[in-house]
Amino acid sequence: MEDTTIERFIKQIKQDPHFQKLYKKTETEYKNSKKNDELYFWILFFSNIQEEKKPFTKSQMIKSLIYRISLFYNRIWHTVKIRHSSKWWNQITKRIFLGALPLKNHRKKMCQDNIKVVLSMVEDFERRKNFIATPVNKVMWEELGIENYQISVPDFNPLKLDAIYDGVSIVNRSISEKKNIYIHCKAGKSRSAAIVLSYLSTYGKFDFYQALHIIKERRSIIQLKGKMKNLLLFYHIYGLVHNDQEQHLNFLLQYCKLH
């Protein structure tokens, strides 16, 4: 019987002492995680590869300043409707809504859209009340009977694989339970759009670029530059585990060669 693509991938990487060591490290981490999901194993494996080259991150003070300037600009942008596409959020599929940081005055409309789950792809400081706006926090969501999950990820940086995995898992569970979900970051352009793209191109059964086209068509302001590398990597890891297709094997082998 011919080996599956994932079996061939394992054989290939074990020929390299460095990747064999990473594989054993991943086995230990996976066992300790007590998760029963092969996809998660490979997310850990490729995260370990990336961990060897940690990216530069901005200081908290700089991030806070950039956030406030950006939020102020975002409010002006949507208030004066500079462009037709400047809605605070857009409906992407029957149950998926993608948009900016929900503010106190948005709660009524959220309830009208029958939102049952909110996924917040922001850091803690982004949800605090400030002189520009009052973002909806977890307590406010709970008062409305809406589930709220937060994955703390910094803006202007690529999303880590484990954050993509966690976000996509929450979206997939919500869709499976037939619940409308609102996915947001600060502006609804990058971090949250990345999660929607990763869901649609995996559990949503769309091709990666087809999913990207769908999102751009419904929310034209998305900006994924700088995040595409890990989004493509997640897409191919999922494909290796679930689809047994040659394209995913080739992509991941090439990725390993470059790292």
Image: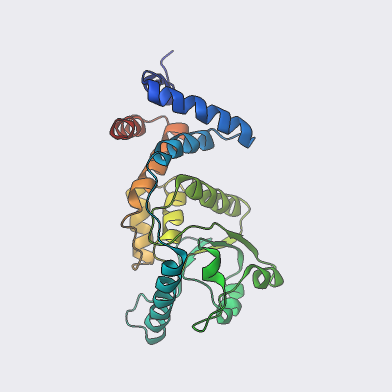
In depth, the one of 184 and 246 nearer the eye is 184
Way the structure is coloured: rainbow
Is residue 35 shown to the viewer in this render? no
Is residue 226 shown to the viewer in this render? yes
Q: Is residue 174 above or below residue 29?
A: below
Give the residue displayed 36% in from the left and 53% down from the top. Answer: 227
Specify the quadrant of the image occupied by residue 67: bottom left
Give the residue displayed 40% in from the left and 46% down from the top. Answer: 54
In depth, the one of 127 and 88 nearer the eye is 127
**Where's residue 95, x and y in %?**
53, 60
Q: Is residue 7 above or below residue 98?
A: above
Q: Is residue 197 above or below residue 2?
A: below
The C terminus lies in quadrant:
top left
**Where's residue 117, x and y in %?**
61, 62
**Where's residue 172, x and y in %?**
55, 50
Give the residue displayed 45% in from the left and 75% down from the top. Answer: 88
**How many numbered marks does the figure carry?**
0
In depth, the one of 142 and 59 nearer the eye is 59
Q: Residue furthest bottom?
A: 80
From the viewer's perspective, tell me whether residue 97 is left or right of residue 249.
right
**Where's residue 118, x and y in %?**
58, 63
Specify the quadrant of the image occupied by residue 150: bottom right
Q: Is residue 151 above or below residue 143?
A: above
Give the residue displayed 49% in from the left and 83% down from the top. Answer: 132
From the viewer's perspective, tell me whether residue 235 is left or right of residue 129.
left
The N terminus lies in quadrant:
top left
